[in-house]
Amino acid sequence: MPKIDSMTIKKIGIIREGKVPPDHRVALIPEQCAAVKKQMDVEVVVQPSAIRRYTDAEYTAAGITLQEDLSDCDLIIGVKEVPINMLIPGKSYIFFSHTFKKQPYNAKLLKAILDKKIRLIDYEVIKDKNKKRLIGFGRYAGIVGAYHAFRAFGLKHKLYSIKAPHECADRAELEQQLGLVKLPKNMRVVVTGFGRVGNGAEEILQLLPLRRVTEAEFLSENWDEPVYTHLDTHDYYVRKDRGGFDKTDFYNNPQLYQSSLPETVVTADLYIACHLWASGNPLLITLQDLQNPNWRCRVIADVSCDVNGPIASSIRASTIAEPLYGFDPSTGKESDWQNDHALCVMAIDNLPCELPKDASEDFGNELIRHVLPRMIQGDPEEIIWHATQTTLRGELTPHFAYLKEYAERAGV
């Protein structure tokens, strides 16, 4: 089966985001388009957009041509799913398709891509030889999610009020807002998960008057200053029969492990969840945990947004317009987050959209560093090939053959 020919990409088109609700991000900002054009010797054009945070005028000022019809482009680059009616037959696309996990809501999209003989490369499965993802918006999910966490804490406890992230012009203004945050001297915060999301969240924590401490210090000492502890998988999962944690054993036998996280979060004031969780892994915080009379934590920011997953209070995704909802542990149902007995939950599933300019620039840097050189100049490790789901012949690639029935059953 033919693989991507790195010599065929001579013209790149940046598509207008068409998904509803509108997404204001873009894969390459004006300056990055100009850099790609110069450094990689390819033509770059941009489809006009009235909603993109970077304006058409900014692209033309950077020397980039606006072009409505992208049918002469060798590669069309987007961010989110491209609406079916915007797909051009016989072209190569790269975007987040959200199909590789057989997401029911995008089966028709994959079927249309196959029918239109489109080559699809999916950002989400672009990984290096160690299976580490090379590109994503995770960093800004963590940054915006952690900011939301402290905004929610201030609102829940009526301590302070700061702008919502989308009300800030950019990250600089968002960071200025953090100066209005007033934390209690005995404030205790728990963060789970590293990677792009968790490390992004920590960028916000480091801008606040918080001391980072170990889990042992967090649990054993009475602090008279705001503190946080940042936990990884081995910190909050233990083997049921003998305790301890073995990474290989855990990923092979997750059913033999249980969560110890409630023992730490029960003493916290704020929990920020940035972990990666698989459906076969043990639950992290159950309804029974939340019903513990000693449970202190009243604000949970589920940045990972695993609905009906490892954290019992995450019963639905929230929205940028309405970022908070309440959860009543006594009933296990949603309630008013302002009620004294309710937990305040933040579980927005599209956090990077709130800082579209900064998130786009960060994503574009990764695209230029890790992806475009492999597509244009050569890919000896075949990283792009292994992220290619469909071919120009309307076929699934061998490593995505498992999606055949998923796509065929969709119909269009």
Image: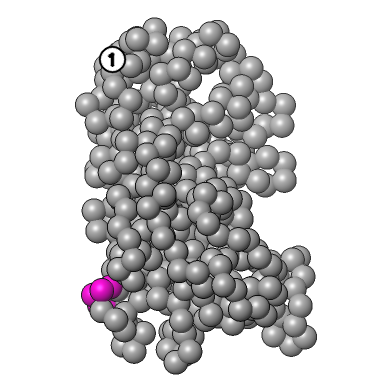
Query: Is 311 situated left or right of 319 in this image?
Result: right
Q: Quadrant of residue 281?
A: bottom right
109 relative position to 289: left or right: left
Label 1 neighbour load within 10 Å: few <14, some 14-19, many 20+:
few
Tell me which amino acid carries mark 1.
Ala
Question: Quick one: SS at disc 1?
Answer: helix
Residue at image position (56%, 51%) is 206
Q: Quadrant of the N terminus?
A: top right
Seen as rendered, the residue at the extreme bottom is: 293
* Residue 400 can be seen, yes or no: no
Percent from the top left, x then y, of residue 275?
Answer: 55, 61
| Displayed quadrant of residue 21 | top left
Mark yes or no: residue 250 visible. yes
- Viewer-side residue, 220 vs 13: 220
> Does 220 appear above or below 88?
below
Q: Residue at x 67, y 32 (%)?
A: 382
- Residue that numbered label 1 is attached to: 57
Image quadrant where one finds the C terminus: top left
Q: Write down the region rendered in magenta.
A: 334-338
